[in-house]
Amino acid sequence: MSERTIAAIATPLGEGGISVIRISGADAIAVADKCFFAFSGESLSNLCGYQAAYGKVTDSVGNTLDDAVALIFRAPKSYTGEDVVEVSVHGGTIVARQVLRRVLECGATLATGGEFTKRAFLNGKLDLTKAESVMGLISARNDAAAKIARGAREGRISRDTEDILNKLLETAASLAAFADYPDEDIPNLSEENFALLLDECYTKCQKLISTYDTGRIIREGINCAIVGKPNVGKSTLMNMLCGLDRSIVTDIAGTTRDVVETTVNIGDVTLNLADTAGIHSTEDTVEKFGVDKAIQKIENSELLLAVFDNSLPLDSDDKQLLESIRDKKCIVILNKSDLQNVFDKKDLSGFQVVEISAREGTGYDELCSAIARVCKTEMLSADDTVLINERQRDCVNRALSAVCAARDALTMGMTLDAVGVCVDDAIAALLELTGKRVTNEVCDEIFKRFCVGK
Ligand code: GDP
């Protein structure tokens, strides 16, 4: 347990109902007792865990800073595993800061970013994947991202990792026993059985990694550009997706002069959306600048919504656009379907095609389904385990490579010691994933990304 008692404002600064100042450490209750006075006259040190007191927080000369509720958590039954006091005061920046300052005067030191969660990890309250999920929950931008983070918080990644670890530990132990007693007839100790165990570990590691990219799209969103000729309805589509007049819509070709950007949630997918200037040949200098930016955006985007006018026949500009997006993750949108449709669809084989009327707002559900299909989010089932950051993917990837190396060593007839070394590498990578064997540097790096107060 750490010696320092730490404190920080745990709620976002700004106007709101309440702000919470959190104090954690061996002296948390003693510190709070110096500046919080219950109206009942009872000292906080007499309260049991999970009890609250209503009173006031005062400054050094006894002036009231605010009315407050102090909630007591007794170690180890608290978030950090230490004694914790959470002081709730009226929301806003000034009062919360004044109370924090007073708490610091009374003996606490200011917590660093993520220090509460780091203490929870160091005190064995949560493993590293669960600690990281806290950050995922805080930063979730849509329901699916929150669900993934909640799954990790409930221990899904830990459970799956534990499962693979147990198999690897069984393999390591069997390898050692087999090396020591090669002539004994011990059940399950055979090269075939080792290969079987390693195969199982391989499949499980692969399964964990397979959901990572989809999870990343759900968490971080996907960079998406709306592209197409001038006047096909790109800005109208952007506005339909945003639900507000974000882009300028006119029927004069070339009115979106630059790239308009915004973020929208479409089902489980967050689109970091850019409406580009229409791509076509132009001599107008300002327009040309917009067209160049649009071409750049196509190259940098992970998903393209390519818009065509369903009421006009396919022309050479359309054909050129179709060619330039053929190898990309894209959806072809035939807009203006409320008018007579003359666009020739036989050139669209191999593309995901959705017919909409951005102006009338029809075809939205079909577009959502197509986005989910292309981004593969619809393939993610409710109980899939999803790795939530690059560090976790890297650990599982290293475990996977080590398992492959162990399988290769076995098939190539190398010594069982050599196989054992690879299995140990895989074990080390997974212990790093859950934080059972992690360096201080890695640990510091992880918690540095958290906000103060978490
Ligand atoms: P952009 O240049 O591709 O961004 O096109 P705009 O969104 O500015 O739209 C160009 C014109 O097409 C405007 O007059 C829109 O009102 C019209 N428009 C856009 N979507 C539709 C649609 O679904 N149906 C019809 N009939 N007109 C549309």
Image (spheres, helix red, strand yellow):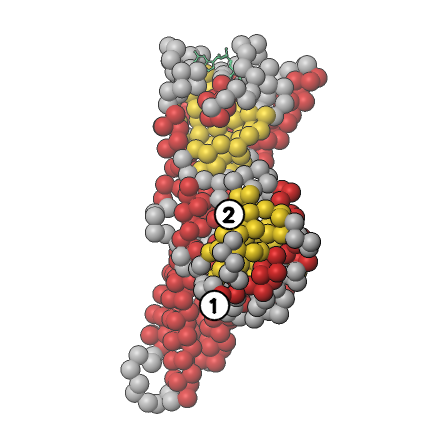
- Categorize mark 2 by other alpha carbons within 10 Å: few (<14), some (14-19), many (20+): few
Q: Identity of the amino acid at label 1?
A: Pro
- Categorize mark 1 by other alpha carbons within 10 Å: few (<14), some (14-19), many (20+): some
User: Gap between marks 2 and 1, in whole Å?
Assistant: 24 Å
Percent across and percent down for residue 270 are: 48, 37
Residue 13: numbered disc: none
Whether residue 132 sits left or right of residue 380 in the image: it is right
**Disc 1: residue Cβ within 8 A of ligand 1's nearest atom:** no
As helix, strand or loop, the secondary structure at mark 2 comes to helix
Residue closer to the observer: 257 or 438: 438
Percent across and percent down for residue 226 are: 52, 26
| Circle 1 residue | 76
Q: Identity of the amino acid at label 2?
A: Ile
Name the quadrant of the C terminus. bottom right
Residue 334, picture quadrant: top left
Residue closer to the observer: 387 or 304: 387
Percent across and percent down for residue 205 are: 42, 60
